[in-house]
Amino acid sequence: EALLQSLDLRGRTFRVCLLLPKSDLVKGFFRGVDSTFAPLGYSFA
């Protein structure tokens, strides 16, 4: 039972992690990181 709850929680956390990149905050963050590392030839695209 505890194992099932743990797996469910992990699955829910994973789903949140999948949805996070779609948020404007994260997009803005990666855009900022991207523009910081772009001169070094490194990009998250």
Image (spheres, rainbow, N blue to C red):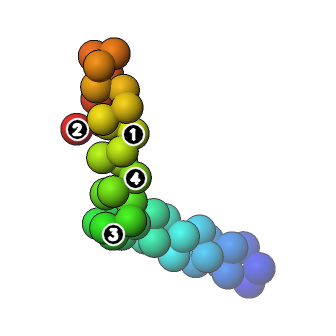
Q: CA distance from mark 2 to mark 4?
A: 12 Å
Q: Is residue 18 visible?
A: no
What is the C-alpha distance between the residues marked 4 and 1?
A: 6 Å
Q: Which label lies toward us, 3 or 4? A: 4
Mark 2 and 1 residues: CB-CB less than 8 Å, in contact?
no
Q: Residue at x 36, y 26 (%)?
A: 37
Q: Say which amino acid is labelled 3.
A: Ser
Residue depth check, mark 2 versus mark 4: number of the one nearer the observer: 4
Name the residue that disc number 4 marks.
29
Q: How many angstroms separate mark 3 from mark 4 (CA)?
A: 10 Å
In the image, what residue occupies the spot 37% across and 32% down? Answer: 36
Is 23 displayed left or right of 3 in the figure? left
Give how far across and how far down residue 3 sits, in percent: 72, 73
Query: Circle 1 — which element?
Result: helix
- Can you tell which quarter of the image residue 21 is in? bottom left
Q: Residue at x 22, y 38 (%)?
A: 45
- When asked about the image quadrant of residue 44, the answer is top left
Mark 1 — residue? Answer: 33
> In screen coordinates, is 16 left or right of 28?
right
Q: Name the one closer to the observer, 40 or 18.
A: 40
Which numbered disc, 2 or 1, marks the residue closer to the eye?
Answer: 1
Q: Residues within 10 Å of mark 3 (few under 14, many from 20)?
A: few
Q: Is residue 40 above or below residue 20?
A: above
**Which residue in the structure is indicated by mark 3?**
23
- Which residue is the site of mark 2? 45
Distance from Cα at disc 3 to Cα at disc 1? 16 Å
- Say what amino acid the circle numbered 1 marks: Val
